[in-house]
Amino acid sequence: MDQPRNAALGEVTVATTTERDAAARRTVSPSAGWRAGLTWWREVIFVGLLYLVYEGSRLVPSPVSGNAAANARDIFHTETRLHLDAEHTLDHWLAGLPTAVQVGASYWYELLHYVVTPVVLIWLYRLGARAYRPARNALVATTLPALIVFWLFPVSPPRLLSGTGVVDIVVSHAQYGWWSAQGTAPGGLNSVVNVDAAMPSLHVGWALWCGIALYRNAHSRLLRAVGVVYPLGTAFVVLATGNHWLLDVLAGAALCLVADALVRRRATSMPNVAVLGRTRFALARALRVARLPVHVPPHATPVRTSPARTTSSHVTPPSTTSARSPRT
């Protein structure tokens, strides 16, 4: 008599646990803990606004734009005295290579800056908030100070400064790309784009940001190798095409490293959002399971249990009334 009853109870327990787990998974998505509060459309708007600020700042004329050539010449003389003027050597070496190599370098400069960075951002978002949020904040902390420097300290690139002997590689191969023969911007935009935004180099800053993100979060050796090669290749391209000074490159790299260090230091002093997200998911799942009713199959014999009984042992609660001795 007890064996069928115990078997029925076992079926009830298994069925109830399965139903509760399934309902909990339907109610609370694991992505709530995985992304820990990230919303894709908010991130798209945020990054889009950052890009608009980046591009819009190039359309705002600097109050000291007339000092761009003088600032560039000061940088040129400083590099010459310190024997750091590598732009001329790299530029002439690239100009002596086949046209296909020069066109490839031009596309590297014009295209990858705007393609690799958003691709890495999307990849980080898919990894989760623990990888994405600090990296996104580091990118913002790298970009905004650079925009202020562009506006207050304009610097002409080597290709636009007379007397340096630098060949404008990108412009000389404009027939192979979408940029114009008058500058690196698309045709018709050279008159409104700030071409004196050389210091610091955001090409190098963003490339180094991508390299750090790949090397820090990738498990594949290939991706980690890309994280090393991409910023080094970008630094070479911007110098060899005459678009940045060596001091621009060093300043862009330093800005990225400082921004990343500050963001990481702040992140370590705050609660781990990924752990908080997983905890929130676990709590929501537990609450959902606790609210689910228990469904007993028709063939099972229901068992009445006392709400106050918490253990399997039968303990008789103490009596709330005491026996009174009769009065004499």
Image (spheres, rainbow, N blue to C red):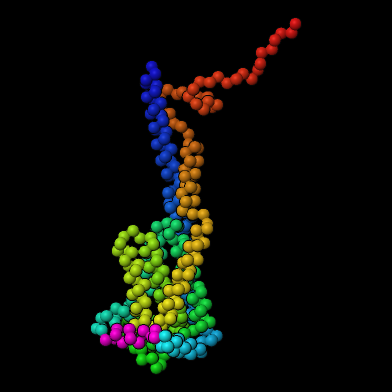
- Where are the magenta residues, as a range? 83-96
Residue 92 forms part of the magenta stretch: yes
Please name whichever residue, 46 or 204, is drawn nearer the observer in this view of the structure.
Answer: 204
Give the dominant element type of the magenta stretch: helix, strand or loop: helix
Query: In the rendering, at what x and y percent does residue 78 appear?
Result: 45, 87
**Which residue is drawn at the image coordinates 69% and 12% (left, top)?**
324
Query: In the rendering, at what x and y percent does residue 239 appear?
Result: 36, 81
**Placement of 25 over or under 158, stated as above or below:** above
Furthest residue to the bottom?
Answer: 163
**Which residue is drawn at the image coordinates 42% and 90% (left, top)?**
161
**Which residue is drawn at the image coordinates 44% and 61% (left, top)?**
132
**Which residue is drawn at the image coordinates 64% and 20% (left, top)?**
320
Query: In the rendering, at what x and y percent does residue 244 appear?
Result: 40, 82
Please name whichever residue, 244 or 297, is drawn nearer the observer in this view of the structure.
Answer: 244
Q: In which quarter of the view is residue 115 placed? A: bottom left
Q: In which quarter of the view is residue 112 placed? A: bottom left
Q: In this rendering, does residue 299 appear at all?
A: no
**Placement of 296 over or under 100, stated as above or below:** above
Quadrant of the snapshot with the C terminus: top right
Please name whichever residue, 58 or 221, is drawn nearer the observer in this view of the structure.
Answer: 221
Residue 36 forms part of the magenta stretch: no
Is residue 91 left or right of 286 when viewed as pictured?
Answer: left
Quadrant of the snapshot with the N terminus: top left
Q: In this rendering, does residue 100 appear at all?
A: yes
